[in-house]
Amino acid sequence: MRNIVSRKLEVNEVYDPTISLIDAWVRIRESTIAPILKIAIYICIGMSIMLFLERVYMAIVIVCVKCLGKKRYTKYQLDAIKEELEKKRNYPKVLVQIPMFNEKEVYKLSIGAVSGMSWPSDCLVVQVLDDSTNEVLREMVELECRKWMEKGVNIKYETRNNRNGYKAGALREGLKKEYAEDCEFVIIFDADFQPEEDFLWRTIPYLLENPELGLVQARWKFVNADECLMTRLQEMSLDYHFSVEQEVGSSTCSFFGFNGTAGVWRMSALNDAGGWKDRTTVEDMDLAVRASLKGWKFLFVGDLSVKNELPSTFKAYRYQQHRWSCGPANLFRKMFKEIVTCERVSIWKKWHVIYAFFFVRKIIAHWVTFFFYCIVIPATILVPEVHLPKLLAIYLPAAITLLNAASTLRSIHLLVFWILFENVMSLHRSKATIIGLFEANRVNEWVVTEKLGNTMKQKYNTRAPKRPRSRIRERVQVLELIVGVYLLQCAIYNIIFGNNHFFIYLLLQAGAFFIVGIGYVGTFVAN
């Protein structure tokens, strides 16, 4: 009788559906998932090493530049050039373009700051390019222009009946005006930028001294960096871009990406490059690459800052990052052959533009952050057959992170928040990069970054209306929630079956994805 019972138990154990599912999962994991995951790890490790070497190279260059005092703009005798210019009184004619689209909150700031710049009035033309669709707002902008016109400023108010080409189209149409034809230099300021009074005196002399210079770029200074945690984290990323990437490009190859604003172009360089094109959403970078291939040199002036505003709502920031990530990838696809076959620049400069500027910084950097740190490494928790060394899982990403964050020491205490937030944003950036490379849907999507201007200063003086319940649906980001669930599952699995503390990172990162996924990040502004 005992033998019969034991045989029945054995039969039940053999055909237990739970055990069968576990065995099936183990077989699939060992035969299919583990080999695929190993290949993904090798690819991600290769990309991580590329990114790490690029960061180390830029760190070495920037240390040499700062320690040896070899910043290119310091080689110019700016005061002597200014004195000679004032002595001869042969001032070049300058055109300042301010493109805007429904910029209700900030249009007065930019028009007022530009109109107050110091330069002979007969040699300065301010051009406001208003593509606004709000007729009342158009009248307000035109009225502001008339106010400065009465004060003696040579300001022109220009509108269009369409938005063809978006910003690039507006700038292109502005240069066709008769009064712009005899201008030697053109400056672009976005609607939220507020240049200092001496901006022209600190940029134009460089172009007068060196006829090979096609562009002089100033850096950005953020007036609302302390508005919320999201703006502080943006400041950390952009400070690295200006303090390191732009400075290294200017010091080594005389090339960097034009930031689309706060820059002075030599008109002949702009025309030689083919003018403004609207084939991508990064018309500024497109122009810079084409001008560089024509042999023009660029200069970054790191000690000249122009005040501007960071997007403080997550919706505005997300749209901005989509454009900034999708556009460069799409431009890389369109210009790769043109860069390779160009005969006017050196092989070193071609390598710098293709490999460092485009491939590593605009594509690899996003893919490594998302696919390696948020997908592949957590997947190794669920697949114990794959071993990931600590050197690659912890130390290499930590080194890259410290090199990035070193540019904003005042926010170093926010380093953990910055890492988590950048990992979340890498989801959007990676998706946008893929869209740009394959020219998929939304490749040419252009959404103007919302500026709040004085809105946030006024919100403390007035009681904001209660937000409608329907807005919660607008804030929810489904992709972030899906990734958050995946990371949470990996964390729970690591807590139960793991023998390390990797679940701490997974829980923090899952929390970051959930917070962003339900829209509780950035500033909330009532309609």
Image: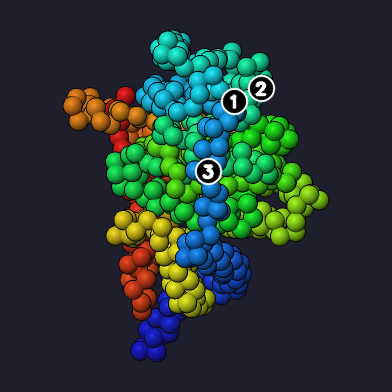
Q: Earlier in the sequence, mark 2 or mark 3?
A: 3
- For mark 2, what is the residue? 182
Q: Nearer the viewer, mark 1 or mark 3?
A: 3
Residue 355, percent across and down? 66, 58
Residue type at tag 1: Lys
* Secondary structure found at label 2: loop
Quadrant for the C terminus, please: top left
Location of residue 193 (image quadrant): top left
Label 1 close to label 2 by CB (< 8 Å)? yes
- For mark 1, what is the residue? 93
Quadrant for the N terminus, please: bottom left
Residue 404, percent across and down? 45, 60
Location of residue 104 (image quadrant): top left
Residue type at tag 2: Asp
Can residue 90 be seen in the rendering of this structure? yes
Q: Is residue 244 above or below residue 234?
A: below
Q: Which mark is residue 71?
A: none
* Secondary structure found at label 3: helix
Q: CA distance from mark 1 to mark 2?
A: 7 Å
Q: Earlier in the sequence, mark 1 or mark 3?
A: 3
